[in-house]
């Protein structure tokens, strides 16, 4: 986001969107945060809900570090974590996410 316009998309190619969905269980948020931290990606915003007692959904924003995991490595680590947890985890660059959801 631009400091002058907080709703404007970021020009930072290192900003990513992490989406998670599946059946709720203990440790989903912790595991996503762990994978991001190990890849030196800074979790900057998160929103999560549990719907109808067991449907877990989460969207998070993170900044990848130039010194950390690259996009493909982070994507692979999150996909592996999702398989372990029994949830679907998607990683997208913010610019791609916004382009896909533009009306």
Image (tube, rainbow, N blue to C red):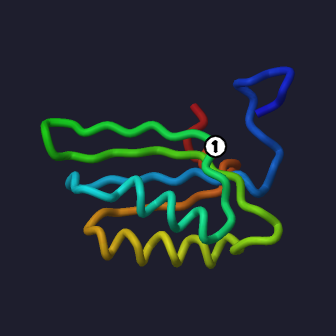
Left or right placement of residue 88 versus residue 2 in this view: left
* Residue at screen point 60% across, 63% down: 37
Residue sitting farthest toward the left: 53
* Residue at screen point 62% across, 78% down: 73
| Among the 4 quarters of the image, the one containing residue 66 | bottom right
Left or right placement of residue 5 versus residue 7 in this view: right
Residue count near mark 1 (Cα–Cα under 10 Å), binned few <14, some 14–19, many ≥20: few
Q: Secondary structure at mark 1?
A: strand
The C terminus sits in image quarter: top right
Residue 33, given in percent of the width and then of the height, sits at 50, 58
* Residue at screen point 64% across, 54% down: 16
The N terminus sits in image quarter: top right
Q: In the image, is residue 88 above or below residue 23? A: below
Q: Nearer the viewer, residue 76 or 65?
A: 65
| Among the 4 quarters of the image, the one containing residue 83 | bottom left
Residue 95, given in percent of the width and then of the height, sits at 70, 49
* Residue at screen point 60% across, 36% down: 102
The residue carrying mark 1 is 44
Residue sitting farthest toward the top: 4
Residue 89, given in percent of the width and then of the height, sits at 42, 62
Residue 64, given in percent of the width and then of the height, sits at 72, 60
| Among the 4 quarters of the image, the one containing residue 50 | top left
Q: Nearer the viewer, residue 59 or 103?
A: 59
Q: Nearer the viewer, residue 101 or 16?
A: 16
**How many numbered marks appear?**
1
Left or right placement of residue 27 versus residue 36 in this view: left
């Amino acid at each position: 986001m631009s400091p002058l316009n907080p709703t404007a998309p970021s020009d930072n190619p290192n900003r990513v969107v992490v989406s998670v969905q599946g059946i709720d269980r203990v440790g989903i948020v912790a595991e996503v945060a762990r994978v991001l931290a190990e890849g030196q990606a800074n979790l900057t915003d998160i929103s999560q809900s549990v719907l109808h007692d067991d449907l877990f959904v989460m969207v998070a924003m993170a900044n990848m570090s130039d010194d950390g995991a690259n996009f493909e490595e982070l994507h692979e680590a999150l996909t592996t974590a999702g398989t372990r947890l029994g949830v679907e985890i998607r990683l997208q660059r913010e610019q791609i996410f916004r382009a896909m959801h533009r009306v």
